[in-house]
Image (cartoon, rainbow, N blue to C red):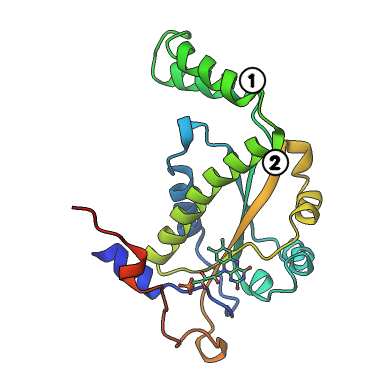
Amino acid sequence: MQLLDALNWRYATKKMNGETVPQELVDQIIEAAYLAPTSSGLQPFRVFAISNAALKEQIKPIAFNQGQITDASHILVFAAWDNYTEDRINTIFNHTTTQRGLPAEAMNDYKNMLIATYIPRPENQNFEHAARQSYIGFGMAIAAAAELKVDATPMEGFNGPELDALLGLTEKGLKSTTILTLGYRDTPNDWLVNLKKVRTPKEEFVTIID
Ligand SMILES: Cc1cc2nc3c(=O)[nH]c(=O)nc-3n(C[C@H](O)[C@H](O)[C@H](O)COP(=O)(O)O)c2cc1C
């Protein structure tokens, strides 16, 4: 299976060589995140694709000086909705019914059930739910990059509130959840590149119930 070959090839790249990833490949990686399934199809996250060198320099200290931030060609910042609102949920369902040529009220029962469930909940519970959806897109992007032989580092090692302030995410009702750096491995200088990929023993990981 080609996907498994790609997943074995990829690793959390520690040192990148500064080469530029062609835009069409970056676009395909973003497309994979865009096509990710999400709970009720709300897609409660956004992706910021950053190649600007000066901005990457500003992000590096926020990401604990991890060198991949500036050695990468692009970094993708995943950011989730800070909360669910009636307006956000209505917008999604209006878009879906319009795109499918359905009457505006066709999905009202389901939409109203979601509004009744999500809106009374604490903001942080809704953000955490939205953040989980962002990780689905993040995972898809990781797999897509591997399939395209683009190296990537998944990252949670950054100060979220500082990144949110720098990118103006708070005003947009978003909070950063993850970063995916995209670039090409610097094989002679990456301490991880030749180390064995290690995972929990399979029999501990999976339980077969026949
Ligand atoms: C959500 C998440 C956050 C991570 N954060 C970082 C990070 O900040 N910096 C880093 O170098 N690696 C980070 N990693 C990489 C993991 O350490 C790595 O994926 C794991 O050890 C498995 O190794 P592999 O990806 O090389 O197969 C992160 C991975 C994930 C999935």
Q: Nearer the viewer, mark 1 or mark 2?
A: 1
Residue topped by disc 2? 174
> Mark 1–mark 2 contact, CB under 8 Å?
no
Whole-percent x, y for residue 25 in the image: 46, 59
N-term mark: 1 or 2: 1
Whole-percent x, y for residue 105 in the image: 47, 8
Helix, strand or loop at disc 1?
A: helix
Q: Local crowd at mark 2 within 10 Å, few (<14), some, or many (≥20)?
A: many
Residue located at (50% from left, 87% from top): 187
**Picture layout, residue 143 above or below residue 186:** above
Q: Amino acid at mark 1?
A: Glu
| Label 1 within 8 A of ligand 1 by Cβ | no
Whole-percent x, y for residue 74 in the image: 60, 63
- Pick the residue in front: 210 or 173: 210
**In which quarter of the view is residue 82 placed?**
top right
- Pick the residue in front: 10 or 161: 161
Q: Which corner quadrant holds the N terminus?
A: bottom left
Report the residue that reaches farthest toward the bottom.
188
Whole-percent x, y for residue 33 in the image: 48, 48
- Ligand 1, by image quadrant, is bottom right
Residue located at (36% from left, 65% from top): 205
Residue located at (42% from left, 40% from top): 37
Residue located at (77% from left, 64% from top): 62
Tell me, for residue 86, which label it has, or none.
Answer: 1
24 displayed left or right of 190: left
